[in-house]
Image (tube, rainbow, N blue to C red):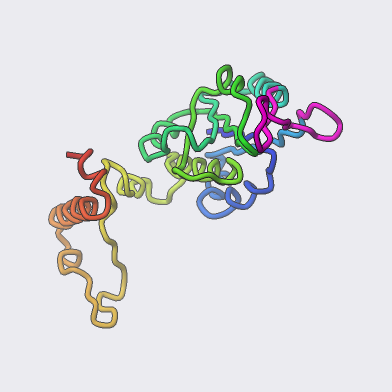
Amino acid sequence: MRIDILTVVPELLESPLSHSIMKRARTKGLLEVNIHHLRDWAVNEYGQVDDYQYGGGAGMVMMPEPLANAIEALSAKTRYDEIIYMTPDGPPFNQSTANQLSLKENLLIICGHYKGIDERIRQHFITMDISIGDYVLSGGELAAAVVVDAVGRLLPGVLNDETSALFDSFQDNLLAPPVYTRPADFRGLKVPDILLSGDPRKIEEWRHDQSVQRTADRRPDLHQSSD
């Protein structure tokens, strides 16, 4: 999979995508992430990519010309399955969306900044809006890193145990069950006997029951949608 990210603050993306599982995915050649500086398409020698908004009001807006030129230049080299804009007014990002995007080959992610991007860019270029929550960040970079991480870990061969992602929280609208490791007795707190039984069927049933109960207790909205 190839993911291109267009941003005015490329430094914010370098560290989150250069360690742990994302580093492994990129090293293995399973995920290619390219970070592009929007100022390479600035309208003048001063690197301008934003301007005051029509109608007045506080905050700057990312200009259409640099964004259009950048998107067209990148699209001339790569056919994108989705051109994604990270924005707080987009549909909430969830595991289902991550699963869908993991099946794509090429993605372009646009990171908003300031008061956002000119609406004409959204109308003519953007194919998908994504929000990672009902709050506002300084820019779309950290949100883009979240999307890349959530999608990248689903690619075949990225995780050492490829079945691991199948039991993550939010798969099948359920939270993951509680997990335990050694020692079996930690300060008098013991691992449930069922996990030490060696009976795979009973363990699977216990984990499913725990997932259902945990979801009902902690995320009743998910519990209702899974019924």
Residue 189 belongs to magenta span? no
Q: Residue at x 29, y 62 (%)?
A: 179
Locate residue 70 relative to residue 121 in the image: left or right.
right
Residue 168 higher or lower than 80, as above or below: below
Residue 89 higher or lower than 55, as above or below: below
Residue 55 belongs to magenta span? yes
Locate residue 59 relative to residue 207 in the image: left or right.
right
Locate residue 197 relative to residue 4 in the image: left or right.
left
Q: Residue at x 58, y 20 (%)?
A: 125
| Numbered range of the magenta stretch | 41-64
Counting labels gives 0
Q: Position of residue 83 (x, y in %)?
A: 55, 26
Q: Residue furthest right?
A: 45
Q: Residue furthest bottom?
A: 187
Q: Residue at x 58, y 40 (%)?
A: 140
Q: Position of residue 207 (x, y in %)?
A: 20, 55
Magenta: main secondary structure: loop
Q: Position of residue 149 (x, y in %)?
A: 50, 45
